[in-house]
Amino acid sequence: MNTLLDLFLTFVRIGCVTFGGGYAMLPILERELVDKRGWTTLDDLRDYFSIGQCTPGIIALNVSTFIGEKRGGIRGAIAATVGFLTGPVTIILIIAMFLRNFAQLELVQHAFAGIRVCVCVLILQAILRLWKKSVVDPFTLGLYLVVFVLHAFSGLLPVQIPAAVLVILSGLAGVLAANRKNRAAGKGGAAQ
Amino acid sequence: MNLLLLMAEFFKTGLFSVGGGLATLPFLYEMSNRHPEWFTHADIADMIAISESTPGAIGINMSTYAGYRAAGIPGGILASLALALPCVIIILIIARFLARFRQNRYVEGAFYGLRPASIAMISAAGLNVARIALVRLDALTSGAGLGEFFIWKALVLAVLIFIGQKKLKWSPVIFIALSAVVGVIFKF
């Protein structure tokens, strides 16, 4: 099939099932892009998520653009991003036209309470799968705990640190820690 | 003219909201103050509810909805594209940069720190969903027992999905659809 059309249709499908922010998307992306199509690797996907957290725009959109670019350059990026937008935009247009009190319908509330449970499990699986390659030593474990506490319980803290700032600081800490590790390794005779 | 103004406003929102859909909220409130004829604060509250129950991030949903209110179907489509545009441009630039500097020592070092931070934020997001989906926080303050705190049927469903995913290897999409059906039948 034509690469652009393939990209577009794949992301239409992904866009239609992205509930609960971009994070629940990870297992779906892994299934569709890594397992079934071999378009990218789980490692690359995780890095796209990291970048998506400190660049403007919605993470799910950023990831679509990244994968589209990798497959088909600028045109691929546009095909994937527009594909991703198609489902949500269509659904909201229909709701705006016909169903003003959509979210109050009992049926809808029950269905989405069920979907939220599934989203929890999907996110948990994403974490379990990424854990092994990301939290590899005391430094990364410490950083994980600090960022988790600061981010998850930001409501209880006197000062709220924006996510983007946390991400940038984590990147800097990574550079410093990696440097120290390299220097220590260098002294041991394994200089890079 | 109205359409151009609408696109400019959502382009700006897309450019400055960093880190997920909820980051667009403060911009949406400001926009509503400037253009009350597009949408009101009450509309934003409705939109948050709708956003939670439809696919897509709230930023996209809000731009579609506000665009539709302001200028019909073309408005809905153009406002959403305007929101996405800055993010596409920036990611295109970063993608080129990454391809060239992937092996750079500093870029590798940055990812060494970014990866655990990224998972930490995913964990926080998961905790947020679990807080609504699996437990009743108000049971704690009202002094009811642990039996009231957990939403047991949701926990059973969660365990079943977890095992099912491991054993069956179906697409996550199927599990999302099944969960919706279970939610309706068992009145979650």
Image (cartoon, rainbow, N blue to C red):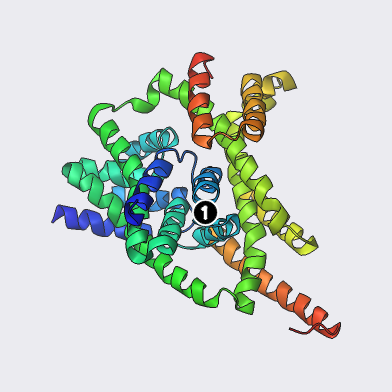
Q: Position of residue B185 (x, y in %)?
A: 50, 14
The amino acid on which the numbered mark 1 sits, given as a three-letter code, is Gly
Indicate whether B12 appears above or below A176: above
Regarding residue A153, the answer to whether it shows in the image is no
| Disc 1 packing (10 Å; few <14; some 14–19; many ≥20) | few
Quadrant in the picture for residue A70 = bottom left
Q: Closer to the camera, A145 or B158?
A: B158
Chain under callout 1: A
Q: Nearer the viewer, residue B175 or B3?
A: B175
Judge whether A139 appears above or below A25 on screen: below
Residue farthest to the left, as pictured: B1
Residue under the point 23% across and 51% down: B78
Q: Quadrant of the N terminus of chain B?
A: bottom left
| Residue corresponding to mark 1 | A38
Q: Is residue B149 visible?
A: yes
Q: Residue at horizontal 24%, vertical 47%?
A: B77
Residue B32 spot, x, y in % from top left: 30, 47
Image x and y of residue A39, in percent: 49, 56
Q: Is residue B122 above or below residue A109?
A: below
- Residue A34 is left or right of residue B141, and the answer is left
How many marks can you see? 1
The reply, left or right, for residue B60 in relation to residue A150 is left
The residue lying at 25 percent from left, 59 percent from top is B8
Closer to the camera in the image, B45 or B162: B162
- The front one of A35 and B13 is A35
Residue at 63% over, 19% down: B153
- Check the image and name the residue furthest to the right: A188
